[in-house]
Image (cartoon, helix red, strand yellow):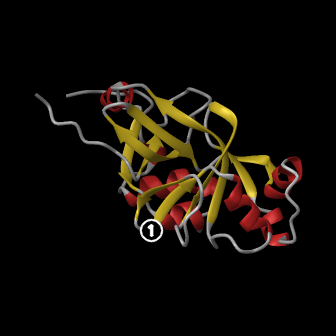
Amino acid sequence: MIETTYLTNHFLIAMPNLMDPNFFHSVTYICMHNEDGAMGIIINRPMNVDLGDILEHMEIESTNLVANRLPIFAGGPVQRERGFVIHQPNEQWDAMLTIEDNIAVTTSRDILSALATGKGPEQVLVALGYAGWAPGQLEQEMVENAWLSIPADFDIIFDTPPEKRWETAAKRLGVDLTLLSSEAGHS
């Protein structure tokens, strides 16, 4: 039996030949991966919406001009109306999944209210929607060379401009995506 390696707290870097428009040139942060499947949030697809728009829609009053200007990311094709906040877990939130000691994902309103008043985490990435894989699906896509994977790097999530995250993540793995062929091969 082949031992399965789970990819929680890793990035999936879309190979250049992955043409699915939901994942073309994407970097996905894997929040959960186990025998039941996988869930991740795309971290390099800013939308034409900012947090101020979302707060207004949710009727949360904001006094934090910096938070109001935070871009909202298209986190994936599943439940595009559902919000996710990737952040460093400086305190406990109502619906928080701690992934590692220094990273968590929260889906509750309380973190947005805290951000609106300047009391939330300093480093955040807010996304609408997520990417999901059925049991064994991600493993099969890895075998088919759809993705590269590396351990997550918080500098890429929080400090690298979104348009540079795909190439930067691959370079951390030692791969220049511009040199890869669009044809997958196996030896």
The picture places residue 15, in percent across and down from the top left corner, at 45, 37
The image shows residue 5, relative to residue 110, as above or below, that is above
The image shows residue 128, relative to residue 164, as above or below, that is above
* In this rendering, position of residue 150 left or right of residue 108: left
> In terms of secondary structure, where does tag 1 sit?
loop
The picture places residue 28, in percent across and down from the top left corner, at 51, 45
Number of numbered callouts drawn? 1
* Residue bearing mark 1: 102
Q: Amino acid at mark 1?
A: Asn
* In this rendering, position of residue 30 left or right of residue 184: right
* In this rendering, position of residue 47 left or right of residue 37: right
Viewport quadrant of the C terminus? top left
Residue at 64% x, 73% y: name it: 122
Viewport quadrant of the N terminus? top left
Q: Do we see residue 122 in this rendering?
A: yes
Residue at 40% x, 67% y: name it: 101
- In the displayed orientation, state which residue is furthest to the left: 1
The crowding category of the residue bearing disc 1, from other C-alpha atoms within 10 Å (few below 14, some 14 to 19, many at least 20), is few
Q: Do we see residue 161 in this rendering?
A: no
Given residues 125 and 162, the one toward you in this image is 125
The picture places residue 35, in percent across and down from the top left corner, at 30, 32
